[in-house]
Image (cartoon, helix red, strand yellow):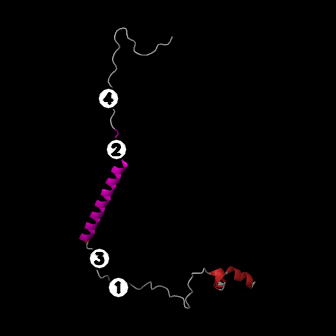
Amino acid sequence: MAVVLAGCAPGAMIDKLPDAVGLSAGTPARPAQAADYPAVHDMPPPRADPALSTDQQLNVEKELNAARDAQEERLKTEQDPPPAPKAPAKKPAKKPAKGENTGAKTNP
């Protein structure tokens, strides 16, 4: 029974495998003491530079919007194919002179 339960929890067994099977050649050794959890509730120190003011934020937003609009315009002009050259207007066909055929063959 102990063997079956040990097979269900391989975590402890993996640590005891030989280096040739368990770890690759360049793997660093495990530390003797496990690291503590990160300090979740510790706040970072206050910033040295103040955050942007409302006016500065508005200016930055305007600059970003202008850059985005310029890129969209440039992309639109690059994607649109150039207009096709207009074909010259066709001259109307001349009426055949008296006694001339129109060029159409008649069925026998």
Residue 20 image point, x, y percent: 65, 81
Asked if the stretch drawn in magenta spans residue 78, the answer is yes
Identify the disc placed on residue 82. 2
Q: Amino acid at mark 3?
A: Ala
The quadrant holding residue 3 is: bottom right
Determine crowd level at label 1: few under 14, some 14-19, many 20+ residues with C-alpha closer than 10 A. few
Q: Nearer the viewer, residue 100 or 33?
A: 100
Disc 4 target residue: 89
Region in magenta: 55-84
Q: For the residues marked 2 and 1, what is the alpha-carbon distance in whole angstroms?
A: 57 Å
Name above or below for residue 64 compared with residue 107: below
Q: Which residue is mark 3?
A: 51
Mark 1: which secondary structure? loop
Tags 4 and 2 touching, CB below 8 Å: no
Q: Nearer the viewer, mark 4 or mark 1?
A: 4
C-alpha distance separating marks 4 and 1: 77 Å
Marks 3 and 1, how far apart in space? Answer: 14 Å
Tag 4's secondary structure? loop
Decide whether residue 61 is among the magenta residues. Answer: yes
The single residue placed furthest to the bottom in the displayed view is 32
Q: Main secondary structure of the magenta part?
A: helix
Q: Does label 4 or label 1 sit earlier along the sequence?
A: 1
**Circle 2 — which element?**
loop
Q: Position of residue 1 (x, y in %)?
A: 75, 83
Q: Amino acid at mark 2?
A: Pro
Give the labeled residue for mark 1. 45
**Along the horizontal axis of the image, is 22 left or right of 97?**
right
| Badge 3 or badge 2: first in the primary sequence | 3
Query: Which residue is found at the position 34% from the left and 44% from the top?
Result: 82
